[in-house]
Each structure stands twice: as C-alpha cells, then as structure tokens.
Image (cartoon, rainbow, N blue to C red):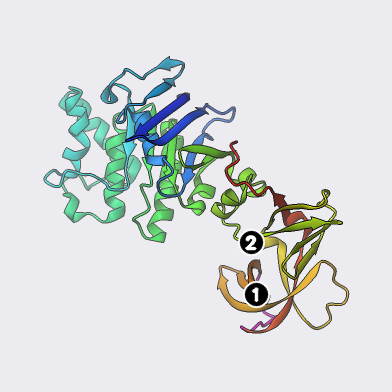
Amino acid sequence: MTKLHLKNINKTYNKYEKISNFDLSIDELKIKDKDFFGIVGGSGCGKTTLLKIIAGLINIDCGTISMDEKIINAILPQKRNIGMIFQENLLFPHMSVYENISFGLKIKKFSKQEISKLIEDVLQSVGLKGFEKRYPNELSGGQKQRVSLARALVLKPDILLMDEPFSALDPRLREEMRNLILKLHKEYNMTIVFVTHDIEEAFNLFNNMIIMKEGKILQKGTPMQIYENPINTYVAKFMGINNVLYGNIKNNIFISNNLKINSNKFNKDNINGNLILKPECLKVLKIDNCNEYRNIFEGTIKEYSFRQGFIIFKICIGFMELEAIQVYNSELEFTIGEKVFVQYNEKGLMVVADEEDVKC
C-alpha cells in the first residue's frame, strides 16, 4: 500500500485561506488490509479541496505532497496513478458500461485483449457482470456508482480518493456500497482516502481519520478514540454527542443553571468549561423507588423513539435538553411529559476548555 505525506500545505482563494499549514501522513499500518483513512468535517471545511490537491487538480501555494517518499508536486494528475470518485458518478451518458470503463485504458494504449480481460475482472469484482452493454440511463444510482468504482479500479491506482460517493444513495444502498468498498479495499490492497460528513459511515469504514474545520485538523485518531476523547465541543457534536453544557466547577460539582453534577473527575475548582455527557451513559429511571440510586437529577420526557432495540430520549431539565440512549425494556413504559430521574455514569463525563479551535 502507498504511503501518502502532505507537509505544510497552504492554499488561498481570493485572499481567503482554504487550507492552512496542513500536515498529514497516511502510512501503511502494521496490520495489513486495515488502512482505510477518512477525512471528516462540515461543509466548506476544505475536505474536497484537500482531495483535489492530492489528485493534482488544484495547485498549492506552498508545501510538498509525496507518495512513498517521492515528491509529486510537479507531476501531472494523469501521471500520478491516483483514482478519484466523486458524489456525482460523472459517467459518459452516450457510452455503454463497457465503453465507460475502457475509456482510461484506451488513453493509456492498452490492447483490445488486455482491455477485455481487465474489464471482465473488474465487473466481477463490483458485481456488474452482464451489464457491459447497458447505458447509464438504464442503471440505478447504486449501479452507476459501481461503474464509477470499476472505471477507477481498472487502472489499478496506487491511491483511491473518494469524495462522499454514497451520500446521494438511500440508506440500504449506502450500507451495500460500504460493504462493497471494504471488500474491494482488501481485494485490491490499495490506500483509500475517503471524505464524508456522515459519522455512521466513519465508524463503519475508517481505521484512522481526521476531523477538519476551516482548513485545519482539529483532531486525528481512530473513530473510537475521537468519540471517547473529543478535544473540544465542536468535535464532540460532530461525533454525535449533543449533550454539551456550559458551567462552572467548584468543590467537585459542575453547575449549569439549576443542574448540579457531582464527580471526582472534576479536580479543578473555580473554572468555567463545557461538560460533555455521552448519551449512552445516561439512564432514564421511573420516579418511584429511586432512593437507592446516586448520581441522579430530575427531568421531563420531551420525546422518545425506538430504534433497533434502543430507546432514544430527549429529556428537558429546565431550559436545557439532554439526549439519553438505553436498551429497550418491554417492562418499562414511558410517556411524553412524564417526570423521570436521569442517572449519569461518571465514566461518560468529560470537561473541555471554552475554546473550540484547539489544534491537534
């Protein structure tokens, strides 16, 4: 697998800084077939710009890009042996599946026999055997993206860049395509750099990832590492932790409005900060017979929903709202507007500084 390094990358558009002092190394991991790298962030954070820089579609102001220790800044995009798949499939509508896939091979002067064999193999890999003569308007959205994958894979790229390729597909097809790309990643043994804003996708695909904001890296690590230890409230919310309260800590007690949370984890006094409460570490309890419980506070159920064996609660505490997730228990029935106790597990508490834009 190819090692990719970006050092001190800067790119400015019309005096607006898009990518700033950007350093990133994507190395082959010690465990084979396990290096699937993700770039995650909100709209406009520079994810797509970064992919285009790697591909050579955008020139940088300064910095170096290298593949396996070889600097590729001056190498033309078509000479970098990097494949790229966008959210739009960008297939030629007047060409058949076979013609679309063979397009790059013809430019590279492959023989008809070589093209035929390569296309046969790649169609088998992406599950489109027998679709050679169909045209894009005869394909579903998922099938079109499979053709896009085949068109990139048939050239055997050293690195495959994927820019939110499944975001336009319905949930079932997205899951199907994720499973396919994991299979292809292992089969073709290539470095994949995948851009998304979908955290579920990140957990399903990535072994390592970065979270970007305004052209900079906020945090990097495995999805689990980042979820367990978000560096700031922006990262926490991006990872799906919406329970963020601002308050003050004094005598091991965090106070936010009328809510008080006690924990030995709060080892600094008289500081202001943001308390992050992971939703799976909150347990909703009936008001009755709660005297034996500790670490609880009172709230009112605003809404709740059932999802694949779990109940997701929205609990109002004064003017604040918290989310709790717990395993469904058919013996417990809750109603909207019901007053409940919420128990917190101290392991799910984390205080971070006021400043969000802490650089990793």
Q: Where does the image place residue 76, in percent across and percent down from the top left?
A: 28, 21
Tell me the element at label 2: loop
Instruction: Name the secondary structure under disc 1.
Output: strand
Whether residue 311 sits left or right of residue 193 in the image: it is right
Q: Is residue 44 visible?
A: yes
Q: Image quadrant for the C terminus?
A: top right
Amino acid of disc 1: Cys
Residue 358, quarter of picture: top right
Viewer-proximal residue among 81 and 304: 304
Return the residue at label 2. Answer: 243
| Residue 243 location (% of width, % of height) | 64, 61
Of the image marks 1 and 2, the number of the one nearer the N terminus: 2
Q: Residue at x 61, y 45 (%)?
A: 226
Find the magenta span and give its range. 327-336
Give the main secondary structure of the magenta stretch.
loop
161 or 126: nearer the eye?
161
Residue kind at label 2, given as amino acid type:
Asn
- 137 relative to 77, above or below: below
Residue 79 on image: x %, y %: 28, 21
Is 115 on the left or on the right of 199, as rendered? left
Q: Write the residue at 59% across / 76% down.
A: 304
Q: Is residue 1 visible?
A: no
Residue 85 lies in quadrant: top left
Residue at 64% over, 68% down: 322
Query: On residue 49, which mark appears?
Result: none
Labelled disc at residue 316: 1
Residue 199 within the segment the image draws in magenta: no
Q: Circle 2: is it few (<14), some (14-19), or many (20+) Cα within 10 Å?
A: some
Residue 258 versus residue 155 in the image, above or below: below
Q: Residue furthest left?
A: 94
In the rendered image, residue 27, in percent from the top left (x then y), is placed at 52, 26
Do residues under tags 1 and 2 come within 8 Å of each other at their CB atoms?
Answer: no
